[in-house]
């Protein structure tokens, strides 16, 4: 089924909040954020007949629309683009959505489920009063028994402290502010960070004709395809992506693993350090210091690359064992192993902004959520939300969606939001005392296919 294009329009509240004598609007549940995670939770709550509203500071899919670089595509294949009730069924299942296509998918989902979104409504505080949460949203106050934090895990750049030591004459850009090479000065560029974003941006800038140096820290190396199938197919089919947060030995460590070195491209290329080095990009160790005109790098480059190679091969061994157990060896390509990451014998530990003509630094060092509006004692010493699989600790009725490895290894992907929302909505229903007759319907309902490409 091909879905027709829909003109952009503001979404409105479908629920009927009641204004109390104190001037508060009341609702059973408030969701903060209208990205794919917040919308998946909305669909689950609707199927449980729980009235709710979604506050969105900008537009639906706001981060996807305004905070990504121009050439970015999803790292997951189109066939993995699915939310409860909507899935991709176009003519390019093995392709990768552009950002406009991703936005169209999420906007169409909001329309399909009649999501009660209030756009351009910024939540500036959430506090606790007696047995309810008080939400300040624009110039209105709301009272809600439950709140779901789905405002995104990538609101702010996570730059290292040494970024403050950068000389004023050097252009400093975080990935949230990067759009394309044309915004950069002519001259050399240092990209700090070797996960998916860092590698993609480094390659794009190099192809623009600028000399690029890549500072490499801990990273996850993965092939785009393995034995003739996308690596995401193997991880999905074998159950790796369904591994639960309470099944791993160190969930804190698992939640802080860097994003894999993958790129979504029509060529289905492998993107790794060997490829970048072959193009002429200079590899250095982790950026450890900036002092006046000097840049200092760690001597750990060889060790971190060997560790990444080792972990990749362990994963491929797991895939091979699963393929053999399932009797797939005759249906797929034979096992293969990739060349080890090549590192020069003694990588330079020092560079100079002036001597090496470095004009710009791109900080591809990750993101963090913006929780400055959350006036509740639920954050740990690093500013993260303390939670047990999305159930916020010491805050009855407060939930968290969209974070890395929230409840499953796939939680941060679009297709991972549905299962997490189903789990947490049932917990939320129990908290609210929703009748059992209304429970366990979160996965019901027809699935609609999505294959519309957005118009220019």
Image (cartoon, helix red, strand yellow):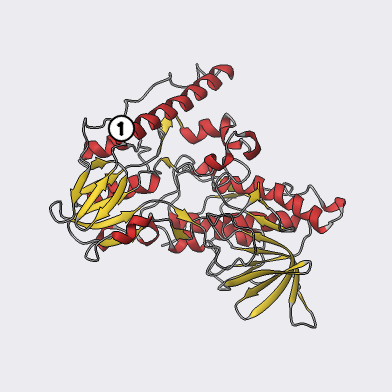
Residue nearest the viewer, comparing 72 with 295: 295
Q: Is residue 348 left or right of residue 397?
A: left
Q: Residue at x 39, y 56 (%)?
A: 159
Q: Residue at x 24, y 58 (%)?
A: 360
Residue nearest the viewer, comparing 454 with 78: 78
Check disc 1 and report its element: helix, strand or loop.
helix
The reply to whether residue 11 is visible in this rendering is: no
Q: Locate residue 211, reporting x and y percent.
A: 19, 49
Q: Locate residue 353, reporting x and y percent.
A: 18, 55
Q: Quadrant of residue 118?
A: bottom right
Q: Locate residue 259, reporting x and y percent.
A: 45, 43
Q: Locate residue 138, reporting x and y percent.
A: 60, 78
Q: Which residue is mark 1?
A: 302
Q: Quadrant of residue 151?
A: bottom right
Q: Is residue 278 left or right of residue 340?
A: left
Placement of 257 over or under 51, stated as above or below: above
The reply to whether residue 293 is visible in this rendering is: yes
């Amino acid at each position: 089924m091909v879905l027709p294009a829909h003109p952009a329009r503001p979404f409105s509240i479908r629920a009927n909040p009641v204004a109390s004598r104190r001037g508060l609007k009341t609702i059973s549940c408030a969701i903060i954020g209208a990205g794919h995670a917040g919308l998946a939770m909305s669909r689950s709550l609707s199927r449980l007949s729980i009235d709710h509203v979604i506050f969105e500071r900008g537009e639906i899919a706001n981060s996807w629309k305004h905070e990504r670089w121009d050439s970015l595509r999803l790292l997951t294949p189109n066939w993995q683009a699915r939310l409860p009730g909507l899935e991709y069924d176009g003519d390019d299942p093995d392709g990768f959505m552009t950002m406009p296509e991703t936005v169209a998918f999420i906007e169409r989902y909001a329309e399909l489920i009649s999501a009660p979104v209030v756009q351009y409504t910024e939540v500036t505080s959430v506090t606790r009063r007696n047995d309810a949460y008080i939400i300040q949203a624009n110039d209105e106050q709301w009272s809600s028994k439950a709140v779901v934090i789905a405002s995104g895990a990538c609101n702010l750049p996570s730059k290292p402290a040494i970024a403050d030591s950068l000389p004023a004459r050097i252009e400093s850009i975080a990935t949230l502010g990067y759009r394309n090479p044309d915004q950069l000065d002519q001259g050399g560029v240092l990209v700090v960070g070797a996960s998916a974003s860092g590698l993609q941006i480094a390659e794009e800038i190099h192809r623009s004709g600028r000399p690029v140096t890549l500072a490499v820290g801990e990273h996850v190396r993965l092939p785009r395809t393995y034995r003739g199938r996308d690596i995401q197919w193997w991880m999905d089919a074998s159950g790796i992506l369904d591994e639960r947060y309470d099944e791993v030995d160190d969930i804190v460590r698992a939640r802080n693993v860097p994003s894999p070195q993958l790129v979504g491209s029509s060529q289905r290329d492998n993107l790794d350090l060997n490829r970048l080095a072959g193009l002429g990009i200079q590899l250095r160790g982790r950026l450890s210091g900036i002092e006046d005109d000097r840049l200092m790098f760690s001597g750990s480059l060889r060790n971190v690359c060997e560790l990444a190679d080792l972990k990749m091969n362990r994963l491929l061994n797991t895939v091979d064992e699963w393929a053999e157990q399932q009797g797939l060896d005759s249906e797929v390509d034979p096992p293969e192993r990739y060349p080890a990451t090549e590192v020069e014998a003694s990588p330079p530990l020092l560079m100079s902004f002036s001597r090496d003509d470095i004009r710009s630094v791109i900080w591809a060092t990750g993101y963090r959520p913006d929780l400055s509006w959350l006036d509740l004692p639920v954050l740990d010493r690093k500013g993260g939300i303390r939670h047990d699989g999305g159930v916020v600790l010491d805050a009855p009725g407060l939930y968290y969606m969209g974070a890395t490895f929230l409840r499953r290894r796939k939680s941060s992907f679009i297709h991972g939001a549905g299962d997490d929302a189903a789990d947490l909505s049932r917990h939320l229903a129990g908290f609210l005392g929703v009748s059992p007759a209304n429970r366990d319907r979160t996965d019901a309902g027809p699935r609609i296919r999505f294959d519309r490409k957005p118009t220019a």
